[in-house]
Image: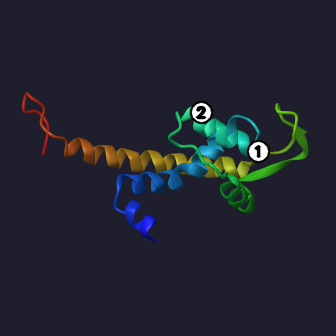
Amino acid sequence: MQEKRKISGSAAGMEVNLKKSVTEMLVLLLLRERDMYAGEVSDELDRRSCGLCGIVFPYSALYRMLDYEYLCERNPKRIAPDGRRRQYYGITERGQAHLEELLACYRRFMDGVTAVIEACREPDENGEGNT
């Protein structure tokens, strides 16, 4: 419980919450490009975000999205580049529609956050900006 108190109310806590909020959207974006297996999803998120948005255990997100029919399991299992048989996941039409909703929501929200940040920015050396 002490660890939660350290994270709550900190920049690290904010990062954890932001990552949780966008994980589903990022996974759907990757799977819109091509089918992937769980480890590949984790590796791609980590690589494309320079380590900022990686997820160690993607199964909870994948299984939740399977339950909502945003994803489907591609059968049969395929041989991955490492030579092992892997379960690949793909985005469904329902998942594609959900992704579009998530992207629109994300853009609206980020526009609002940016507007507040810009309105409250510190003045520069020329005295321009708001406080």
- Where disc 2 sits, the SS reads helix
Viewer-side residue, 16 vs 72: 16
Residue found 53% across the figure and 50% down from its top: 22
Lateral position of residue 87 relative to residue 60, left or right: right
Dot 1 amino acid type: Gly
Which circle's residue, 2 or 1, is located before the other in the chain? 2
Position in image of residue 48 (x %, y %) = 57, 33
Viewer-side residue, 56 vs 106: 56
- Where disc 1 sits, the SS reads strand
Q: Which image quadrant is residue 107 in?
A: top left
Dot 2 amino acid type: Arg
Lateral position of residue 64 relative to residue 16, left or right: right
Query: Residue furthest toward the right?
Result: 76
Residue 90: which disc? 1
Residue found 36% across the figure and 44% down from its top: 111
Q: Are there few (<14), some (14-19), or many (20+) residues within 10 Å of tag 1? A: many
The reply to whether residue 96 is visible in this rendering is: yes
Position in image of residue 32 (x %, y %) = 68, 39
Position in image of residue 23 (x %, y %) = 57, 50
> Quick check: 70 above or below 30?
below
Q: Which image quadrant is residue 43 in?
A: top right
Q: Which residue is mark 2?
A: 47
Position in image of residue 130 (x %, y %) = 13, 42
Q: Are there few (<14), some (14-19), or many (20+) residues within 10 Å of tag 2? A: few
Query: Residue furthest toward the left?
Result: 127
Viewer-side residue, 9 vs 68: 9
Residue found 51% across the figure and 55% down from its top: 21
